[in-house]
Image: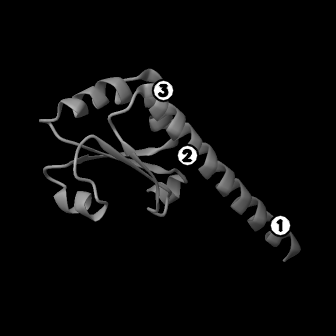
């Protein structure tokens, strides 16, 4: 899906018992600015730390809230303690998104050049 949509992926780990995760849901996911960039520019995946333990362990996630940003090939680009404020989170997701768009643009330009000379 990420490769088809050409979007990076945000995976966030939470747990219903975690007060900081409830704050993350309200302050980060519920913030109109962060919500907009996540919905428009990312594929958003929610993980329950109690259910998805093996996945969490694979990425060394041991506490919620925790966020991993991946490129479309599932390479980790950024690891973020989810106990952050909306402005910091928005800045980080914007920077990662801009970096990925720049990389994809360069790849598209190279592909176009090779198609023109072939």
Q: Considering the numbered disc 2 on the image, is that residue within a helix, a strand or a loop?
A: helix
Badge 2 local density, few (<14 within 10 Å), some, or many (20+)?
some
| Left-right relation of 105 to 26 | right
Residue bearing the label numbered 2: 96
* CA distance separating discs 1 and 2: 26 Å
Badge 1 local density, few (<14 within 10 Å), some, or many (20+)?
few
Badge 3 local density, few (<14 within 10 Å), some, or many (20+)?
some
Quarter of image, res 97: top right
Foreground of the two, 62 or 100: 62
* CA distance separating discs 1 and 3: 39 Å
| Left-right relation of 99 to 77 | right
Position in image of residue 111 (x %, y %): 74, 67
Numbered mark located on residue 87 in the image: 3
| Left-right relation of 66 to 77 | left
Q: Is residue 16 above or below residue 30?
A: below
Q: Earlier in the sequence, mark 1 or mark 3?
A: 3
């Amino acid at each position: 899906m990420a490769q088809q949509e050409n979007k990076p992926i945000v995976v966030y780990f939470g747990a219903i018992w975690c007060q900081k995760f409830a704050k993350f849901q309200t302050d980060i996911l519920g913030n109109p600015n962060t919500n907009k960039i996540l919905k428009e520019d990312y594929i958003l995946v929610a993980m329950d730390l109690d259910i998805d333990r093996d996945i969490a362990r694979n990425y060394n996630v041991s506490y919620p809230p925790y966020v991993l940003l991946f490129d479309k090939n599932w390479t980790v680009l950024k690891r973020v303690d989810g106990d952050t404020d909306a402005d910091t989170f928005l800045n980080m997701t914007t920077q990662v998104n801009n970096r990925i768009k720049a990389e994809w643009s360069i790849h598209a330009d190279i592909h176009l050049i090779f198609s023109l000379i072939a």
